[in-house]
Amino acid sequence: MKKKESMGVQQVICMKGGVGEGSYARNSKSQAALLSKSMPLLEQAVLDLCCTTLPESVAIADLGCSSGPNTFFAVSEIMTIIYKRCRQLGRSPPGFWVFLNDLPGNDFNAVFKSLPAFREKMKEENGEEFGPCHVAAVPGSFYHKLFPSRRLHFVHSSCSLHWLSQVPPELLNKQITNKGKIYLSKTSSPALIDAYASQFQRDFSLFLKLRSEETVPGGRMVLSLMARRTPDPVSDESCLLWDLLAQALQGLVSEGLIAEEKLDSYNAPYYQPYTEDLETEIENDGSFSINGLEIMVLPWDSASGGQNYDRPTTAQKIAKSMKAVQEPMLASHFGAEIMDPLFKRLMEIIAADTREVEHVSVLVSMTRKA
């Protein structure tokens, strides 16, 4: 990627919008499963917040909200827990400000079209007295300052922080190359591995610094992101699906559908950190105390929504799920016309491959120190 393309990362890292067959809204079962698995730790963080003196209006930010049925999942749980807990304690429930953040390319139109149904659902579950609840979109990168200082009481982010602010600069300026690949792999050089690790470290430490400025002392933050259980950054656990996608792209090169140089200049702005390294980064920042850290694991076929299918059907569902996430980025670089043949080939490769890996995420709950 050239520098111009790096500057456009914010515009192309977005899930496929709309509600059609290939949309993220229709192909995000894995992300929904992760949200469900995170609920116990999220609930405890909210209950702990309720033990403090709450203001008249609680500000909640969901960073990387995307669009579709998962968008309001966490924020609705956070508000419901606060509302019901305050009622149990005989305290007046607060009002709510909900800030939904994602990059400008996110389908915010779809999000706000679903807002009336969300408001109705909250009234049905909590009673007509629930609220007020104000919802606002905050387009922009969470690697930039998004809110005034000490504005937020609860910060949530799910399935987002593994996306980097940019491809490592060493790849952009061609100090190092990644020929025929689009991410880390078994053949990656130590320099490439270090470049990705350093980019994540810079991004995550900046994210923590910005959120520490925006969050009130005693405020809570719950994050989940793709991660790995092993120190090895090129294990199948974090690289297999990227390798298979690279194979599909290599196939299109051999057919003459894309130029080899085009493949060699594409690298994913993505990184799965080792869970212990993530914990170290939080401790080094020093602004947050860790209340809980859990590793969450989903099965290989989690895109099937818990259903057991044969290998070809599972391959189809995995390919559709990957397309819903990656199509905007890939189409921006390679062209929209090759998306269907690319993901058809990917489906065939997954169906023929016998390897399977679990999908690993890390969930961490933190409190902003005083």
Image (tube, helix red, strand yellow):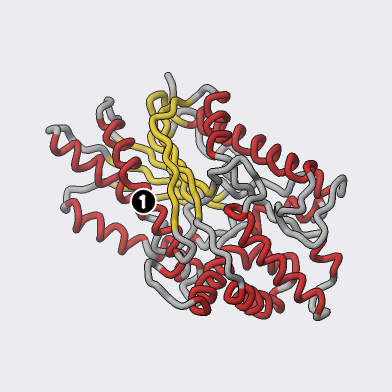
Residue under the point 14% across and 32% down: 89
Report the number of discs. Answer: 1
Question: For the residue marked with disc 1, what is the amino acid?
Answer: Lys
Kindly tell me whether residue 134 is visible in this rendering.
no
Q: Residue furthest top?
A: 370
Left or right, 309 with respect to 355, comes to left
Q: Where 126 sits versus 195, above or below?
A: below
Residue under the point 67% across and 35% down: 202
Residue 119: % across, % down: 29, 57
Residue under the point 41% across and 24% down: 217
Left or right, 334 with respect to 106, comes to right
Q: Where 274 sits versus 243, above or below?
A: above
> Nearest the camera: 367 or 33?
33
Kindly tell me whether residue 209 is visible in this rendering.
yes
Residue 10: % across, % down: 65, 53
Residue beneath label 1, please? Answer: 37
Residue 12: % across, % down: 65, 59
Left or right, 75 with respect to 206, comes to left
SS category of the residue bearing label 1 = helix
Q: Where 223 sits versus 37, above or below?
A: above
Instruction: Give the quarter of the figure containing the C terminus.
Output: top left
Instruction: Give the quarter of the figure containing the N terminus.
Output: bottom right
> Nearest the camera: 295 or 90?
295
Residue under the point 69% across and 69% down: 331
Local packing at callout 1 (Cα closer than 10 Å; few below 14, some 14-19, many 20+) is some
Which corner quadrant of the image does residue 347 belong to?
bottom right
Left or right, 317 with respect to 55, comes to right
> Nearest the camera: 65 or 226?
226
